[in-house]
Image: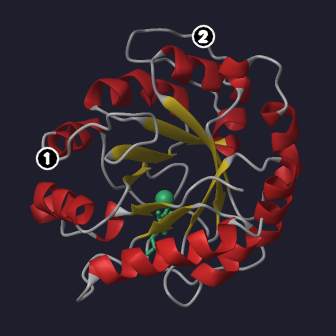
């Protein structure tokens, strides 16, 4: 059986003027994690938020008591130089640092806030660095990136280099509220076939109309922004998303 359903509302669609309350309310309404979209205007053509905001909302959401537990801050780092921000986000209260494969391999100037100018941004090194700082590590791929790039990383003999989660984007990263792209689900299917226990997250355009396809493919971590925030009954949407994943779990 694949891992349990994890529902992670994306705060990109929250009321930013009332963020602390928005976040704590979503947890009360049944969310497991909060998905925090960090965009730097370089890796994607949009800017959202940085570590100070994560520090502020951490005061409103209790830290998870167990690994992957309720209240996990799932930081989706759509930034050009992910290594620069690992320590910064760890100090802010991030629990899961999910960087983009495409950013890691193309990163050039990776000086960290500590002045560490080691430019090595090999994905496995990144994962080890994130783990050494006590966070869970995720690796994300854009819709056009082939899943094959992940086999070497997922097959690493060093457990510190193995990610805790893979994020398969189902929209082009950069904006909330886009239409779901079904094509990347073939990557989810292949990941699930090879790795029955892996946390596989899908992100972009997920909601009541698209969840079944993602659940059948084998995704268990579901990000939903515009389908949850600002809706009349967010708790009902969260339950619907969870039920769709749970229904498929036994079959996978
Ligand atoms: O990473 C993202 C965009 O780059 C967001 O997490 C994602 O788009 C969620 O928003 P929605 O559910 O409205 O599509
Ligand atoms: Fe995201």
Asked whether residue 153 is in view, the answer is: yes
- The image shows residue 182, relative to residue 224, as above or below, that is below
Estimate how packed mark 2 is, as few (under 14), some (14 to 19) or many (20 or more) residues with alpha carbons within 10 Å: few
Per the image, the residue denoted by label 1 is 60
Estimate the x, y position of residue 108 in percent, counting from the top left.
Answer: 64, 27
Dot 1: element? loop
Give whichever of discs 1 and 2 has the lower sequence position. Answer: 1
Task: Residue at 36% x, 31% y: name it.
Answer: 89
Rendered image quadrant of residue 95: top left
Rendered image quadrant of residue 219: bottom right
- The image shows residue 1, relative to residue 197, as above or below, that is below
Q: Is mark 2 within 8 Å of ligand 2?
A: no
The quadrant the N terminus occupies is bottom right
Q: Is residue 133 left or right of residue 217?
A: left
Task: Residue at 71% x, 29% y: name it.
Answer: 162
Between 136 and 196, the one lying in front of the other is 196
- The image shows residue 193, relative to residue 111, as above or below, that is below
Per the image, the residue denoted by label 2 is 118
Task: Residue at 20% x, 36% y: name it.
Answer: 55
Asked whether residue 184 is in view, the answer is: no
Estimate how packed mark 1 is, as few (under 14), some (14 to 19) or many (20 or more) residues with alpha carbons within 10 Å: some
Q: Is residue 18 left or right of residue 48?
A: left
Task: Residue at 86% x, 56% y: name it.
Answer: 193
Estimate the x, y position of residue 87 in percent, counting from the top left.
Answer: 40, 21
Between 85 and 162, the one lying in front of the other is 162
Mark 1 touches mark 2? (CB < 8 Å): no
Q: How is the image coloured?
A: secondary structure
């Amino acid at each position: 059986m694949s891992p349990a359903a994890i529902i992670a509302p994306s705060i990109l669609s929250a009321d930013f003027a009332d963020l602390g309350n928005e976040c704590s309310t979503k947890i009360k309404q049944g969310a497991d994690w909060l998905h925090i979209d960090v965009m730097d205007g370089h890796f994607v053509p949009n800017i959202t938020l940085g570590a100070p905001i994560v520090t502020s909302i951490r005061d409103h959401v209790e830290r998870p008591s167990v690994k992957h537990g309720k209240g996990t801050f799932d930081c989706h780092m759509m930034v050009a130089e992910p290594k620069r921000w690992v320590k910064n986000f760890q100090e802010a209260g991030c629990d899961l640092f999910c960087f983009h494969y495409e950013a890691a391999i193309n990163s050039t100037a990776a000086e960290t806030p500590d002045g560490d100018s080691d430019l090595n941004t090999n994905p496995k090194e990144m994962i080890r660095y994130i783990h050494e700082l006590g966070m869970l590590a995720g690796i994300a791929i854009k819709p056009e990136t082939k899943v094959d790039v992940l086999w070497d990383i997922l097959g690493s003999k060093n457990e510190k280099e193995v990610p805790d989660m893979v994020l398969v984007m189902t929209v082009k990263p950069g904006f909330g509220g886009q239409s779901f792209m079904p094509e990347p689900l073939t990557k989810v299917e292949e990941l699930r076939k090879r790795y029955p226990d892996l946390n596989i997250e899908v992100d972009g355009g997920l909601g009541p109309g698209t969840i079944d396809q993602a659940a059948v493919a084998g995704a268990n971590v579901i990000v939903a922004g515009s389908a949850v925030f600002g809706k009349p009954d967010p708790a009902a949407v969260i339950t619907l998303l969870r039920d769709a994943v749970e229904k498929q779990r036994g079959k996978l």
